[in-house]
Amino acid sequence: MTKHLKPADYLKKILTARVYDVAVESALEPAKALSRRLHNKVLLKREDQQPVFSFKLRGAYNKMAQLEPQALKQGVICASAGNHAQGVAMAAHRLGTRALVVMPVTTPNLKVDAVKALGGEVVLHGDSYSDAYGHAVALCEQQGLTFIHPFDDPDVIAGQGTIAMEILRQHQGPLDAVFVAIGGGGLVSGVANYIKAVRPEIKVIGVQMNDSDAMQQSVAAHKRVTLADVGLFSDGTAVKLVGEETFRIARELVDEYVVVDTDAVCAAIKDVFVDTRSIVEPAGAMAVAAIKQYVASNKTRGQTYAAILCGANMNFDRLRFVAERAEVGEEREALLAVTIPEERGSFKRFCELIGTLPGGVRNVTEFNYRISDAAQAHVFVGLTTSGKGESARIAANFTRHGFEALDLTHDELAKEHLRHMVGGHSGLARDERLLRFVFPERPGALMKFLSHMRPSWNISLFHYRNQGADYGRILVGIQVPASDGAAFQSFLDTLGYPYVEETANPAYRLFLRS
């Protein structure tokens, strides 16, 4: 590998890079809603709109287009978590050569299938990029192929640097910083080289996940650091060891680093969707998450920031998790464990208190409860908030009014698991009838339900989660003596909410009814 190229050398390589046989000059769009919220201008570089929904084809094609004919005839190989693999597969198809792609077994099926559809041969090996890389090197030697590195190669770096060239050409006004997600460092190396050669006053800010921050740790240690493990939520940046050349460049040219977490990235995915109606993958939203964090930390106003949306290869099934965590990531939702007396009417009093909390109207986003103790009830509740830091104040307000509350907004165990596990068998749930209701998703729907109930009937189970629709699906257990059967039916008829009785459901009898 050529060592110690200067920004001027990379500038020449970027200006002469061959990328536009396969890549398009992606748009640079203002994020209007996010800009208004942050009081700074945010620009989105739409690399998610490339033919393979990622910037990676730029570097891959630039490298492969410069290979000798004999090397192309033999074929190429790469190791990739997905996006580089698609770039190599597309480039190979365009250049008429064979592409063998080694991918971690954790790679989303969406990316595996995409590589195969482009004509690439896929081998799954290991849990991370680093594991796949070692296997690819061995196969490369065995089969006489040319290795196309996803980031640690000057030609690949130069291909990625064309993004910065486009940004500066597309935006002629002031630009304070460009935020760039970092995995192995190829993208940030290309961007930093071009910007520091042409507009050195513009900051280049690297962005890493808190569970995959090999570059930041390496720069701090003044040597490359190998992570023992990496988080896989942002699979596109899950790299245990950054490249030699990318480490050298980042150490010299990247101005600073911002580390973001999963919840912040989920919130950023939602922010991008609000402004573009497009869904980016976690790596693609990291730069936006970092801008929000940077603005909050530095209290900036009136500045201009560019975020590179580097990919959109998102597994559809992952959207459930993203939607669940986005509100918490933005701290628009407070999660609380609240203890209330196990006595008739206390649930209604608790709901009335929610309606009088300081700070305006708050909607219940989640409510999980199962009777388990004769004296106390423990409920898991979610409430909308209007800003960060409110969850602790809400918990304190509940406690002042006699409902002991624990703030779980930042508790990983609660967010990932406990919220789905509230319930189980209960010997206290005698005469229980189980019903599924469809409530209109509007204020007062729950209070109408509670007000129409007889005071002598007790709620023994309650489960609700806002799903973003105009109606809510609610599961309720109510203790109704057999003698009150007619009155209970009258209650259901008067209520007017669609319902299905599940008391005879075998799943209920197996997991909830003693």
Image: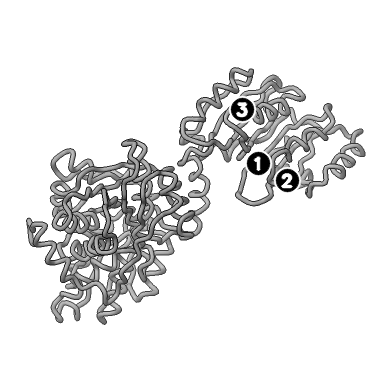
Q: Residue at x 18, y 49 (%)?
A: 201
- Quarter where residue 364 is shown: top right
* Earlier residue among tags 3 and 2: 3
Q: Which mark, residue 183? A: none
| Contact? badges 1 and 2 (CB < 8 Å) | yes
For disc 1, the neighbor class at 10 Å (few under 14, some 14 to 19, many from 20) is some
Left or right for 238, reference 249: right
Q: Position of residue 259 (x, y in %)?
A: 31, 42
Question: What is the number of callouts on the image?
Answer: 3
Quadrant in which the N terminus is drawn: bottom left
Q: Amino acid type of disc 2? A: Phe
Left or right for 9, reference 50: left
* Earlier residue among tags 1 and 2: 2
- CA separation in Å, label 3 and label 1: 20 Å
- Quarter where residue 491 is shown: top right
- In the displayed structure, 360 sits above or below 509; it is above
Q: Position of residue 243 (x, y in %)?
A: 18, 53
Q: Residue at x 24, y 59 (%)?
A: 133
Q: Which residue is mark 2?
A: 439
Q: Amino acid type of disc 1? A: Tyr
Q: Secondary structure at mark 1?
A: strand
Q: Which residue is mark 3?
A: 357
For disc 2, the neighbor class at 10 Å (few under 14, some 14 to 19, many from 20) is some
Q: Is residue 502 among what the camera can see?
A: yes
1 or 2: mark nearer the eye: 2
Q: Position of residue 104 (x, y in %)?
A: 33, 58
Q: Secondary structure at mark 3?
A: loop
